[in-house]
Image: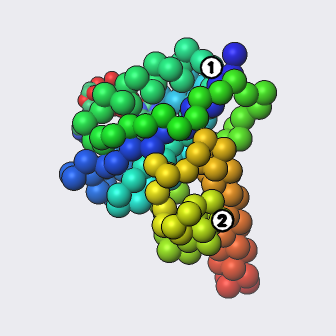
Amino acid sequence: MLVRLIYASRPSQQVGIHGVNEILTISKKNNIKDNITGALVYSEHVFLQCLEGPRNEVNTTYRRICADARHTDCVLLQYMDIDFRLFGRWDMGSIQFKAEHNPLVMKYSEHGFFDPYNMNSRQCEMFMKDIAVAVSKSLKRTLITNHSATI
Ligand code: FAD
């Protein structure tokens, strides 16, 4: 049984870029083992994470994540049975939220700043999907530009 779980939380004070990298390393290792895929969007003030995979493994992973002192205020935003994964190719994609993503936030939020606590379940899902597409496109553009530059 496949499920999708999306939650938001707030980084504890000591978590910087180094802390996020540490989290991603352990996440990728565990998620591959558990057949979990997903994405973590993060800014200085907030985490928004999507986990997709077998129900028991997603539940167990979420319980472990909630107990982690590196963040607080875990709020479950979406939990549903799914027919297919949105992030099937990402063991745990990471997306640092940047000013260039503000137009996406405006699309889904009342106030125009990145605050998943004020987004509903469907908005969080669509926002994560959109931002993943935007990041993949910009990555492709960078690769093409770099490739042309070396020709
Ligand atoms: P161990 O590595 O044995 O650690 C024991 C305890 O210490 C755990 O409670 C752990 O949370 C805590 N801990 C570990 N390192 C630190 C540290 N540097 N500072 C403070 N406390 C620490 N794990 C996944 O498997 N998949 C994910 O997708 C995933 N996403 C995450 C997203 C966020 C925002 C955060 C904060 C954590 C995430 N984690 C994820 C990590 C998860 O919380 C566990 O640390 C990890 O799964 C290892 O669990 P463990 O019980 O083997 O802990």
Q: Using the rendered view, name the quadrant where residue 3 is placed.
A: top right
Query: Where in the figure is residue 139, as x and y percent of width and height?
Result: 65, 66
Splitting the image into 4 quarters, where does residue 84 fall? top right
Residue reaching furthest to the front: 110
The answer to the question of whether label 2 and label 1 lie on touching residues, with beta carbons closer than 8 A, is: no
Amino acid beneath label 1: Pro
Q: Give the quarter of the figure containing the C terminus.
A: bottom right
Occupied quadrant, residue 26: top left
Q: Is residue 37 left or right of residue 70?
A: right
Residue at x-position 43% and y-position 37%:
75
- Point 48% across, 62% down: residue: 114
- Residue at 48% of width from left, 34% of height from top? 76
Q: Which residue is located at x 46 percent, y 57 percent?
A: 115
Mark 1 Cα shell of 10 Å, populated few (<14), some (14-19), many (≥20): some
Foreground: 138 or 11? Answer: 11
Q: Mark number for residue 54?
A: 1
Residue 151 horizontal side relative to residue 32, left or right: right
**35 over 18 or under it: above or below:** above
Q: Secondary structure at mark 2?
A: helix
- Identify the residue position indicated by label 2 in the image: 107
